[in-house]
């Protein structure tokens, strides 16, 4: 067998060992402690990013995002399917009706909405797409979506 045949065989074996290792040892882990610290350092910036993304989403239909008041409650969790780290943050959201929409003139539009803002840790940094879990605080959202998320203990790293 020529030398390049040995190299190809060795590369194939290496790839197979990595794949088997991932199945046996699980997904590569994220240092939860460092990810948590990064979230807390960037929290204000991430909350502003959440507002921009949510306001640009056009959801809920007929409503315009006017304000987010962030609470102190934060829950960290891991997605059961992907192993990706998530943070849920308590938020109170205020809307106003878009002019000419079917929401205009409804008295409930001005009611404040309790929700959890969703953030996720991806490729070494925190991100958001402006997803809100309405009517549930962070702990309630984790309990409700227990099949999807598992809580990450504060001391876990």
Image (spheres, rainbow, N blue to C red):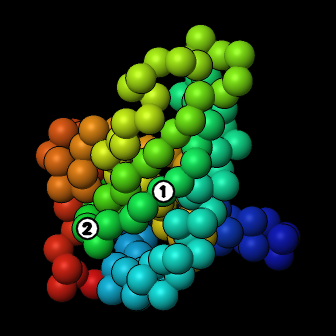
- Residue 123, percent from left and from top: 60, 70
Q: Mark 2 sits on what residue?
A: 73
Residue at horizontal 42 percent and vertical 54 percent from the top: 117
Q: Secondary structure at mark 1?
A: strand
149 to 17, vertically: above or below: above
Task: State left or right for residue 131 relative to residue 70.
Answer: right
Mark 1 vs mark 2: give the one in front: 1
Quarter of the image with the N terminus in it: bottom right
Residue 77 visible in the snapshot = yes
Residue at horizontal 17 percent and vertical 74 percent from the top: 153
Q: Residues within 10 Å of mark 2 (few under 14, many from 20)?
A: few
Which residue occupies the foreground of this view, 19 or 62? 62
- Residue 113, percent from left and from top: 36, 41
Q: Which mark is residue 33?
A: none
- Residue 38, percent from left and from top: 47, 85
The numbered mark, 1 or 2, whose residue comes first in the sequence reads 1
Q: Secondary structure at mark 2?
A: strand
Task: State left or right for residue 79 relative to residue 62.
Answer: left
Residue 125 visible in the snapshot = no
Which residue occupies the foreground of this view, 34 or 7? 34
Q: Rounded to the nearest whole Å, what is the CA distance between mark 1 and mark 2?
A: 14 Å
Residue at the extreme top of the image, as rendered: 102
137 to 33, vertically: above or below: above
Q: Residues within 10 Å of mark 1 (few under 14, many from 20)?
A: many
Task: State left or right for residue 31 relative to residue 17.
Answer: left
Residue at horizontal 27 percent and vertical 38 percent from the top: 135
3 to 84, vertically: above or below: below
Q: Mark 1 sits on what residue?
A: 68
- Residue 23, percent from left and from top: 36, 57
């Amino acid at each position: 067998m020529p030398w390049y045949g040995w190299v190809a065989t060795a590369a194939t074996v290496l790839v197979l060992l990595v794949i088997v290792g991932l199945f046996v040892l699980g997904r590569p882990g994220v240092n939860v402690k460092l990810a948590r610290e990064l979230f807390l350092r960037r929290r204000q910036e991430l909350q502003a990013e959440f507002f921009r993304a949510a306001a640009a989403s056009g959801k809920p239909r007929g409503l315009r995002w006017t304000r987010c008041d962030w609470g102190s409650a934060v829950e960290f969790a891991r997605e059961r399917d992907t192993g990706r780290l998530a943070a849920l943050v308590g938020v109170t959201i205020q809307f106003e009706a878009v002019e000419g929409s079917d929401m205009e003139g409804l008295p409930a539009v001005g009611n404040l909405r309790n929700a959890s803002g969703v953030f996720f840790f991806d490729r070494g940094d925190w991100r958001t797409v402006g997803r809100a879990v309405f009517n549930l605080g962070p702990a309630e959202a984790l309990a409700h979506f227990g099949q999807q998320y598992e809580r990450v203990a504060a001391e876990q790293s």
